[in-house]
């Protein structure tokens, strides 16, 4: 035991106090680091959702290529069976090229995470921006072969000759 400035202190208690202060400082640093990571994660989530909403706003879109999409289920949709969480069977829907669909922002879980979905009468299906466009998709140009063009032109010529004979016959009768 010793004294400093008239205050008595015990070396063992002093070491425990120092260790306690160091542990408290480490815990505060860990807590600050965790808060910083949480804020960064939230910031990235907000940025991602903001980017998603600004680049892919709600509204009507044309389907640019045939694709299948899965029904979005709220996170609480899994029902326990015999003590096990069973995921429901996925529901798929086929969207055809040229079809007009309505895209909306949809909250998919209790944490208020959102996704873009195609709203239909049978539910909300995941919307993939790569398969949707605000402009109507161009139909492929089908080119005819030279033989096909000759055949079609020959048919038109035959029809014109027949019509000319009939018209000539009708005019000569008068």
Image: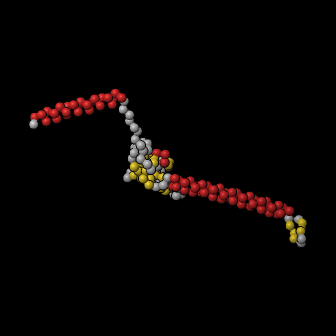
Q: In the picture provided, is 41 more to the left or to the right than 90?
A: right
Q: Residue at x 41, y 50 (%)?
A: 101
> How many badges with numbers are in the image?
0
Residue nearest the observer in this picture, 25 or 166? 166
Picture quarter containing residue 12? bottom right
Task: Judge whether residue 41 can be spotted in this image.
Answer: yes
Whether residue 84 is situated above or below residue 110 in the rendered picture = above
Q: Residue at x 65, y 55 (%)?
A: 37
Picture quarter containing residue 144? top left
Q: Residue at x 86, y 62 (%)?
A: 11
Q: Position of residue 117 (x, y in %)?
A: 46, 52
Q: Position of residue 170 (x, y in %)?
A: 13, 35
Q: Position of residue 56 (x, y in %)?
A: 49, 52
Residue nearest the observer in this picture, 168 or 79? 168
Residue occupying the far top of the picture:
147
Q: In the picture provided, is 122 more to the left or to the right than 38?
A: left
Residue nearest the observer in this picture, 97 or 70? 97
Q: In the picture provided, is 26 more to the left or to the right than 6?
A: left
Q: Position of residue 112 (x, y in %)?
A: 52, 58
Q: Residue at x 63, y 56 (%)?
A: 40
Picture quarter containing residue 15? bottom right
Task: Judge whether residue 89 can be spotted in this image.
Answer: no
Q: In the picture provided, is 11 more to the left or to the right than 165?
A: right
């Amino acid at each position: 035991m010793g004294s400093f400035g008239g205050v008595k202190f015990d070396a063992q208690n002093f070491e425990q106090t120092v260790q306690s202060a160091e542990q408290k400082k480490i815990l505060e640093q860990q807590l600050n680091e965790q808060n910083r990571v949480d804020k960064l994660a939230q910031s990235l989530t907000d940025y991602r959702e903001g980017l998603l909403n600004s680049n892919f706003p709600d509204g009507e879109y044309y389907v640019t290529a045939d694709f299948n999409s899965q029904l979005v289920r709220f996170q609480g949709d899994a029902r326990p069976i015999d003590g096990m969480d069973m995921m429901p069977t996925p529901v798929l829907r086929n969207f055809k090229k040229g079809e007009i669909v309505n895209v909306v922002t949809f909250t998919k879980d209790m944490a208020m995470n959102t996704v873009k979905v195609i709203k239909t009468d049978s539910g909300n299906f995941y919307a993939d921006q790569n398969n949707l466009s605000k402009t109507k998709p161009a139909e492929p140009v089908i080119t005819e072969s030279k033989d096909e063009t000759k055949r079609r032109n020959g048919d038109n010529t035959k029809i014109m000759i027949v019509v000319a004979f009939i018209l000539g016959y009708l005019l000569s009768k008068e």
